[in-house]
Amino acid sequence: MVDVAIIGGGYVGLWTALAIKAERPSARVIVLERDVCGGGASGRNGGFAMSWWPKISTLLAIAGKGDALSWADESVNAIAEVGRFCDENQIDAHFIQGGWLWTATTKAQLDAWRGTMDVCLRLKKKPFQLLDAPEVARRAGSPMHLAGVFEASNATVQPALLVRGMRRVALQRGIEIFENTSVESLNTGAPSLLKTPMAEVQASAVVIATNAWAMAVPELARLMTPVSSAIIVTEPIPERLRSIGWTGGESITDSQLMVDYYRTTRDGRIVYGKGTGVIQHGGYISEVFSQDPVAQTLAETDFRRTYPSLLDVKLVDAWTGPIDRTYDSLPVFGTLKDADHISYGIGWSGNGVAPSFIGGKVLASLALGLKNKWSLCPLVGRQCRSYPPEPIRYWGGTLVRNSVLRKEQAEARGETPKWLDVKFAGLAPSGLEDKS
Ligand SMILES: Cc1cc2nc3c(=O)[nH]c(=O)nc-3n(C[C@H](O)[C@H](O)[C@H](O)COP(=O)(O)OP(=O)(O)OC[C@H]3O[C@@H](n4cnc5c(N)ncnc54)[C@H](O)[C@@H]3O)c2cc1C
């Protein structure tokens, strides 16, 4: 019998385990991970540690002004907490607070941040700094960047080093971690019985921290849709980075809905990702969520377009991964109906590196039955718009996704997209940033 069983050994599961141990050192906490810790999205993401400021309009709609402001601030604090945790525990996860450049790389993307900037102005907050166009191009190292704003609080990490460092600290603090241990069933009785191929565990409280794989829980399956994101990595090119002027450690995105996100690494590579948005029927997480040559080619095409001076640079690695996308692209926390000892935190929507720190506090508080600012966070138990049932979700989602792709490809070629593509693309939910 354990006090808390956490399913999933990514950032969310591990932050939760660490927060529980900090709050209640005597608690017996286990993490059950099907793969190795970090084998899911936490070990293979883009490494952007971002705030929730680009989602301030959505936060306002969910939480009202006071709470929206304090949770946006909390998300900035989470970035610093990741850095502090690394420092205090000698985790060299390449944490660099180089800020985030939110840019436009086509005319159609210009001013994508306008709505967010206006909301910030109304709130008398200034998380973003408007840069002039030459400055954006200079910092990003390519004239393809036509305009942009800068959020200085953002950082980057080497994602796998972070999650493996967290695993080490968790073990040192007495958290028991079982890797290669898949939870195959979970009953809702209290205590719950969790079955794995090797053993059964009884737990007073359970935390579901399985990211996109939470699709396996029927009650959660319509809260999100797993969509793919693809990453390519170049050979080391430190001198070329110096010559194009991208030396400040900035993370960069464009403003496509199928967003391009890119950063440099300590050894002078470019990691270039693209939200490719592939979905599968029933939210099934197939092999295309690990390797997908088509999605990887989309990322490469955008990389070559954005950095024409690096056309000769070789790519040395590529992969894909699942993003647990909610309709409004903010996470949702709660407890299962009729089982308030089973909590969940899902729907990170491509922004989980830093916010998962908040998630750990929230889920630890829910698991321990605490009434505090974390368990009362407005993202807990919120009425999240759900996706339609199958087959509408798959066929409708694919139609919209393909329209977005064609529209944004036409815009990148400087052409006017077809009106039907524009119409269907308009049905897409918002992405990493609120729509302007
Ligand atoms: C390609 C890509 C790029 C991304 N880029 C960024 C970025 O730059 N910045 C950012 O903030 N976010 C990014 N994200 C999102 C970010 O990686 C996630 O939000 C974050 O890692 C979520 O952590 P998690 O612990 O919820 O999920 P995960 O790390 O996926 O952990 C869930 C774990 O649950 C395990 N699991 C599933 N089912 C079971 C089961 N039945 N039994 C036991 N274990 C199970 C899985 O193996 C997995 O390890 C990206 C994601 C991807 C895929």
Image: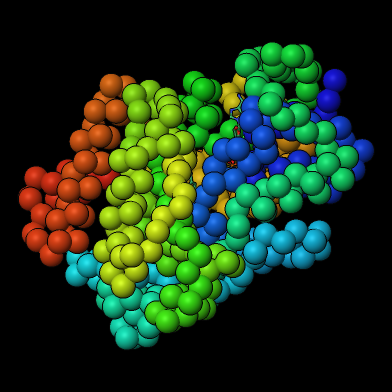
Q: Nearer the viewer, residue 409 or 291?
A: 291
- Determine if residue 399 is in view: yes
Q: Nearer the viewer, residue 264 or 122?
A: 264
- Above or below, 399 relative to 201: below
Measuring from the top left, give residue 311's x and y in whole percent: 31, 65
Measuring from the top left, give residue 299's x and y in whole percent: 34, 52
The residue sitting at 37% across, 37% down in the picture is 292
Q: Nearer the viewer, residue 271 or 309?
A: 309
- Above or below, 6 relative to 405: above
The residue sitting at 57% across, 38% down in the picture is 40
Measuring from the top left, give residue 236's x and y in whole percent: 50, 65
Residue 145: which quarter of the image? Answer: bottom left
Colour scheme shown: rainbow
- Determine if residue 113 is in view: no
On screen, residue 395 versus residue 96, left or right, reads left
Say which quadrant the C terminus sits in. Answer: bottom left
Farthest right residue?
26
Q: Quadrant of ligand 1?
A: top right
Say which quadrant the N terminus sits in. Answer: top right
The residue sitting at 33% across, 43% down in the picture is 295
Measuring from the top left, give residue 385's x and y in whole percent: 39, 38
Residue 327: which quarter of the image? Answer: top left
Marker count (numbered): 0
The residue sitting at 47% across, 40% down in the picture is 321
On screen, residue 303 versus residue 242, left or right, reads left
